[in-house]
Amino acid sequence: MADQVPQLTKEYIVTYRDMMCGGLEREMATTKKVIAAVPDGGHDYQPDPKARTAKELAWHLAAEDVKFLDGIANLGFNMKAGPALATSAEMAAWYETNFTSRLAKVRAMTAEQLLTPVDFFGVFNLPSALYLGFLNNHSVHHRGELVVYLRPMGSKVPSIYGPSADEEWKAA
């Protein structure tokens, strides 16, 4: 039996977009804290020769999240390299600025745009809004990897979904 794709209505896709954008905005604030926690002296840290360095992982996380939002808003993905930033503070600030501006573009999309099928490098061809779920999963996955790097580099783990051993959990 072939997989059946449900019909997505305009009302559903706009509600989905709004729900996902609210969640992504909250996740971005947490991800920014994790990127900022990478000590500049630990940029070359990698737990295994096959692993990315801390700087590579932090930049991958920041840059790809923004590129996902660009791909959704532009109805086409382009994974060109972004600027090279020297410090974790610069990466965190770049991430917040660019993620926020791209998220605003996604929030401004029409239902028709959100329902437009977008090719993802020949692997998927989904309505653009459904890539918000991919973005969320990508971000949470790589943020989790980066968090594991922090203590061995001599940094502290920020609170994420609750307190960490290093940071009390504070209501926003």
Image (spheres, rainbow, N blue to C red):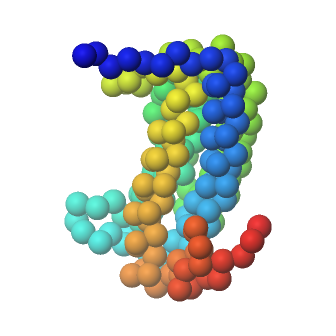
Is 30 drawn above or below residue 47 in the view shown?
above
Horizontal side of 126 relative to 172 (left or right) equals: left
- Tell me where residue 31 appears, x and y as whole percent: 58, 60
- Quadrant hosting residue 70: top right
- Tell me where residue 77 appears, x and y as whole percent: 49, 26
Q: Which residue is drawn at 46% across and 85% down?
A: 154
Q: Check the picture and name the quadrant holding the N terminus.
A: top left
Is 69 drawn above or below residue 5 in the view shown?
below
Q: Which residue is drawn at 61% across and 55% down?
A: 27
- Tell me where residue 49 appears, x and y as whole percent: 22, 65
Q: Which residue is more in the foreground, 69 or 20?
A: 20
Horizontal side of 3 relative to 107 (left or right) equals: left
Is 137 drawn above or below residue 149 in the view shown?
above
- The answer to whether residue 134 is visible is yes
- Quadrant hosting residue 111: top right
- Tell me where residue 101 appears, x and y as whole percent: 72, 40
Q: Check the picture and name the quadrant holding the C terminus.
A: bottom right
- Quadrant hosting residue 91: bottom right
Is 139 drawn above or below residue 68 in the view shown?
below
Q: Which residue is more in the foreground, 22 or 99?
A: 22
Q: How many labels does the image show?
A: 0
- The answer to whether residue 84 is visible is no
Q: Which residue is more in the foreground, 46 or 146?
A: 146
Q: Residue at x 46, y 47 (%)?
A: 137
Q: Which residue is more in the foreground, 152 or 80?
A: 152
Q: Which residue is drawn at 33% across and 25% down?
A: 123
